[in-house]
Image (cartoon, rainbow, N blue to C red):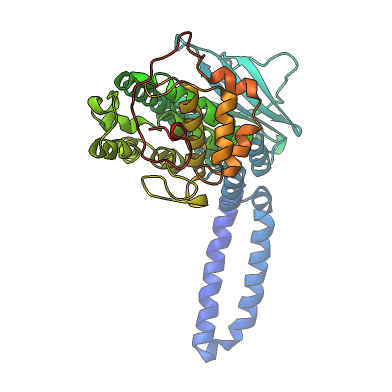
């Protein structure tokens, strides 16, 4: 007996022939009598085609299936992790009630020992840790106690640039067991496999890029602090303060990470300032001060080649802007200053005031917060200052450097000409 695919092919040929006859009857008036029988025949063939095609359309064609998959993702080519929404979309697309995604985990010895199984079964979603194992059905894992996947199963390997990234396991409806390989369900499973393979590969690449970026950040911080010993630990403390402020403002996820990275790199431009300027114990002359003021722009140029975040770039380039427009390098004012830069600016000032430098003794965190409060609305964003005041004092004190055990002899070094607020509230 011909398959559904063969019947559809025959019906399509009949429809084409009827279409030709109908066009001829319109073109030649003497064939006008053909219109009615051709129309009836065309309608009959169309109804037959719709009836035969119903099992296919019930599961959704490729366009609808792809839309389901994309709508379930956070981003179109997403590096977002595959989760419950994705498995529910896959179950709807395939017309099954059991969908599992196995993601192998690599140990430090690079041997595959276990994996994470994300399982949607009869509407219930859960995540399980399973031992990896080969079996006759090539599941790739041993079913944990209390989990029984209904047979028969279809298994699809997810392949990427680094080899196998995972496996999809679905329970196929009983009526499809004898379906030929070219059946629509197999095509949709192939589409699902291609989409999820791309998602997993993108996530792997994003994780590798993030790890490389963090290595670069750590190297740059070490280089800056080696060049300017007075700021040892400064970048890391500013990073921690900035994270607390961003969390107080309600920031989470990627936005929070970008603020932290921008804070950690905010002084990277000092790599472009001569050491004799950075370490000069006396007052800076106009030319030297001009060089110091260039470090935000220099830092932005340094990280521009590998950075992919505007928030990181803005935190580096604009953390010395003032709320009233008297800062540098762009003399931005108010909300024209990017939020990441306003956060880092407050965190930078807090650490500058609570750190011992050659030109100042360090203040207590309480005194520094009072100075920030006095400068809110002039040098600092009042909303960001309110956010740092909501942070428990003990959390800030745990980050601040300890007070010196002996008095530090001060030298007459001036880093900033006539700042709006107290001199030490505007760090270099």
Q: Quadrant of residue 383?
A: top right
Tag count in the figure? 0
- Lateral position of residue 210 relative to residue 176, left or right: left
> Residue 238 placed where, x, y %?
48, 27
Name above or below for residue 102 compared with residue 188.
above
User: Residue at 29% across / 21% down in the picture?
Assistant: 227
Q: Nearer the viewer, residue 137 or 352?
A: 352
> Residue 234 placed where, x, y %?
43, 23
Q: Nearer the viewer, residue 409 or 208?
A: 409
User: Residue at 49% across / 86% down in the picture?
Assistant: 27
Name above or below for residue 327 compared with residue 22.
above
Q: Nearer the viewer, residue 407 or 78?
A: 407
Where's the C terminus, which quadrant? top left
Q: Is residue 183 visible?
A: no
- Lateral position of residue 414 relative to residue 3, left or right: left
Q: Nearer the viewer, residue 10 or 220?
A: 220
> Residue 96 placed where, x, y %?
69, 37
Name above or below for residue 70 compared with residue 412.
below
- Lateral position of residue 372 relative to residue 160, left or right: right
Kindly give the residue lying farthest to the bottom in the view shown.
29
> Residue 381 placed where, x, y %?
55, 44
User: Residue at 24% across / 25% down in the picture?
Assistant: 275
Q: Is residue 231 visible?
A: yes
Name above or below for residue 402 compared with residue 317.
above
């Amino acid at each position: 007996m011909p398959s559904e695919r063969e019947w559809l092919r025959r019906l399509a040929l009949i429809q084409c022939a009827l279409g030709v006859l109908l066009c001829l009857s319109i073109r030649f008036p003497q064939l006008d009598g053909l219109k009615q029988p051709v129309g009836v025949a065309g309608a009959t063939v169309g109804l037959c085609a719709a009836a035969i095609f119903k099992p296919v359309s019930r599961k959704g064609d490729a366009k609808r299936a792809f839309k389901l998959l994309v709508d379930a993702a956070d981003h179109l080519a997403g590096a977002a992790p595959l989760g419950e929404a994705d498995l529910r979309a896959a179950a709807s697309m395939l017309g099954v009630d059991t969908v599992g995604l196995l993601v192998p985990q690599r140990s430090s010895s690079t041997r595959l020992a276990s994996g994470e199984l994300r399982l949607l079964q009869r509407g219930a979603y859960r995540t399980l840790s399973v031992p990896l194992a080969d079996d006759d059905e090539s599941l790739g894992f041993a079913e944990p106690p209390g989990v029984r996947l209904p047979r028969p199963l279809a298994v699809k390997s997810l392949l990427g640039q680094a080899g196998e990234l995972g496996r999809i396991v679905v329970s196929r409806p009983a009526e499809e067991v004898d379906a030929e390989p070219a059946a629509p369900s197999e095509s949709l499973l192939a589409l699902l496999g291609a989409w999820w393979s791309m998602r997993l590969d993108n996530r792997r690449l994003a994780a590798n890029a993030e790890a490389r970026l963090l290595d670069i950040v750590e190297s740059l911080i070490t280089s800056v602090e080696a060049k300017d010993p007075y700021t040892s630990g400064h970048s890391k403390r500013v990073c921690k303060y900035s994270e607390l402020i961003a969390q107080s403002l309600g920031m989470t996820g990627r936005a929070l990470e970008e603020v932290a990275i921008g804070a950690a790199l905010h002084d990277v431009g000092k790599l472009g300032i001569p050491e004799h300027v950075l370490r000069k114990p006396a007052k800076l002359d106009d030319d030297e001060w001009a060089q110091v003021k260039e470090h935000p722009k220099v830092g932005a140029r340094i990280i521009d080649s590998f950075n992919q975040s505007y928030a990181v770039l803005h935190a580096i380039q604009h953390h010395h802007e003032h709320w009233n427009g008297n800062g540098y390098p762009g003399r931005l004012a108010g909300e024209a200053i990017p939020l990441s830069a306003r956060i880092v600016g407050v965190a930078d000032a807090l650490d500058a005031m609570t750190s011992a430098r050659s030109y100042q003794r360090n203040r207590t965190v309480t005194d520094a917060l009072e100075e920030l409060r006095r400068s809110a609305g002039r040098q600092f964003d009042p909303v960001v200052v309110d956010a740092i005041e909501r942070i428990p004092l003990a959390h800030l004190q745990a980050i601040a450097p300890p007070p010196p055990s002996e008095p530090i002899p001060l030298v007459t070094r001036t880093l900033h000409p006539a700042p709006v607020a107290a001199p030490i509230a505007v760090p270099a």
